[in-house]
């Protein structure tokens, strides 16, 4: 097994700026067929930015090691550091590994360790096994949890043992207001809290001039990350999400932030499209009068595949479209349709994933005939 040591200059400021420039240049090229738009660029910290991480636990010569795989390769590399990890991850990696190697019960058939941390000082560690987790393991894990002052979860096939809690609580400041978010271990969370804060601020600024008497439709709301911030600009918000875990977490987050104008429904984008066009009734909407909403804006943050054809048609019915994308290629494909009815007003690039080819982007569009009717 090879130990992977990263050269000191790999994560240099110069290398970071060069890679970010390349990513933004590619994005600008993808937008060029729609016009020459200024792009608001939001760089990340080059190091210490990642708030969650997953590591393979590799057992060799009687010791456990952290390991990761290169893309496209099956053989993992033992790693001796994780410079992009947030302070709680990098500070906890060595003590956790020492504890794993000191306990045959904790280390036996352990194959993965996952970290979920916050900027506000909480750390949750999930240990994943190829064995059932009995009460002897539980006693050892409880002692480890107390020793490290973290939250620990044990997982194996069809088994989840939560020692204290299965979530962390993050605090973020957006335009002078503090927001509190419960982030559940099995749910999706933004990995780069610094960039997430910048994304929330940008999205809020896009919607700040909206008519407070109008309503917002949000598709793919997740745990309410954007919803909680955008809700202040609208009379009511209807948000959709398919994951039960995320719906529950979103409702918790709205309560934590004293937000009472959001309704979350567990529907896919295809289903809400069918409901809004009257093509199909849904039992989950039986207590919601869709005709009572006065939607002005739709916010979408779709998966990497982008918007499907039906959702493209749906969003063009709104005066304003706020689109955050994790895939500039599918965003550009969707813009071919959206720009037939809407003009691009703002464009942003958020470096959510430094040292990768991925770039998070945002586009704000306004209907072409808005104000001309």
Image (cartoon, rainbow, N blue to C red):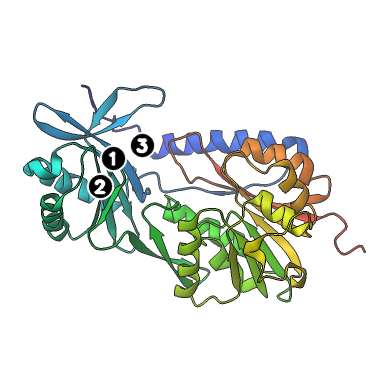
Point out the tag, 2 or 1, that comes first from the N-terminus: 1
Q: Which residue is mark 3?
A: 11
Q: Which residue is mark 2?
A: 90
Q: Residue furthest right?
A: 373
Q: Nearer the viewer, mark 1 or mark 3?
A: 1
Q: Residue at x 45, y 51 (%)?
A: 188
**Horizontal and vertical percent position of residue 78:** 23, 29
Q: Residues within 10 Å of mark 2 (few under 14, many from 20)?
A: some
Quarter assignment of residue 369: bottom right
Q: Quick one: 234 or 31, which is closer to the camera?
A: 234
**Horizontal and vertical percent position of residue 313:** 78, 48
Q: Is residue 287 left or right of residue 292?
A: left
Relative to residue 66, is residue 125 depicted above or below? below
Marks 2 and 1, how far apart in space? 6 Å
Q: Dot 1 lies on which element?
A: loop
Q: Residue at x 38, y 49 (%)?
A: 49
Q: Residue at x 37, y 22 (%)?
A: 73
Q: Quick one: 150 or 370, which is closer to the camera?
A: 150
Q: Is residue 327 left or right of residue 116?
A: right
Relative to residue 179, is residue 360 depicted above or below? above
Quarter assignment of residue 210: bottom right
Point out the tag, 2 or 3, that comes first from the N-terminus: 3
Q: Which residue is mark 1?
A: 82
Marks 2 and 3, how far apart in space? 16 Å
Do the residues bearing badges 2 and 1 touch, measured as CB atoms within 8 Å? yes
Point out the tag, 1 or 3, that comes first from the N-terminus: 3
**Horizontal and vertical percent position of residue 256:** 44, 74
Q: If the image is split into quadrants, where does the C terminus sit?
A: bottom right
Q: Dot 2 lies on which element?
A: helix
Do the residues bearing badges 2 and 3 touch, measured as CB atoms within 8 Å? no
């Amino acid at each position: 097994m090879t130990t992977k040591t990263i050269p000191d200059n790999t994560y240099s400021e110069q290398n970071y700026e060069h890679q970010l420039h390349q990513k933004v240049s590619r994005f600008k090229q993808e937008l060029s067929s729609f016009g020459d738009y200024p792009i608001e660029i939001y760089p990340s910290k080059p190091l210490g930015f990642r708030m969650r991480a997953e590591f393979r636990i590799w057992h060799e010569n009687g010791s456990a090691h952290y390991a990761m795989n290169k893309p496209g390769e099956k053989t993992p590399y033992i790693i001796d550091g994780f410079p992009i990890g947030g302070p709680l991850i990098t500070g906890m990696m060595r003590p956790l590994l020492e504890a794993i190697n000191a306990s045959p019960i904790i280390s036996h058939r352990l194959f993965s360790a996952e970290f979920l941390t916050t900027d506000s000082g909480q750390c949750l560690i999930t240990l994943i096994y190829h064995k059932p987790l009995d009460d002897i393991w539980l006693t050892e894990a409880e002692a480890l949890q107390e020793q490290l002052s973290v939250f620990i979860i044990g997982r194996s096939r069809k088994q989840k043992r939560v020692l204290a809690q299965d979530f962390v609580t993050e605090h973020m400041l957006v335009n002078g207001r503090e927001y509190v978010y419960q982030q559940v271990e099995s749910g999706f969370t933004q990995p780069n809290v610094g960039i997430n804060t910048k994304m929330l601020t940008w999205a809020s600024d896009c919607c700040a001039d909206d008519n407070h008497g109008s309503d917002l439709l949000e598709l793919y709301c997740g745990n309410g990350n954007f919803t909680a911030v955008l809700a202040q600009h609208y009379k009511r918000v209807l948000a959709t999400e398919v994951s039960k875990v995320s719906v529950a977490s979103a409702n918790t987050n709205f309560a934590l932030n004293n937000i009472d104008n959001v309704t979350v429904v567990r529907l896919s984008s295809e289903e809400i499209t069918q409901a809004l066009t009257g093509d199909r009734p849904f039992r989950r909407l039986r207590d919601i009068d869709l005709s009572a909403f006065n939607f002005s804006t739709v916010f979408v943050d779709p998966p990497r595949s982008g918007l499907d054809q039906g959702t493209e048609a749906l969003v063009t019915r709104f005066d304003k479209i706020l689109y955050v994308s994790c895939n500039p290629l599918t965003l550009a494909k969707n813009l071919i349709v959206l720009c037939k009815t809407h003009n691009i007003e703002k464009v942003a690039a958020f470096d959510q994933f430094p040292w990768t080819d991925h770039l998070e982007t945002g586009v704000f569009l306004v209907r072409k005939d808005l104000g001309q009717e």
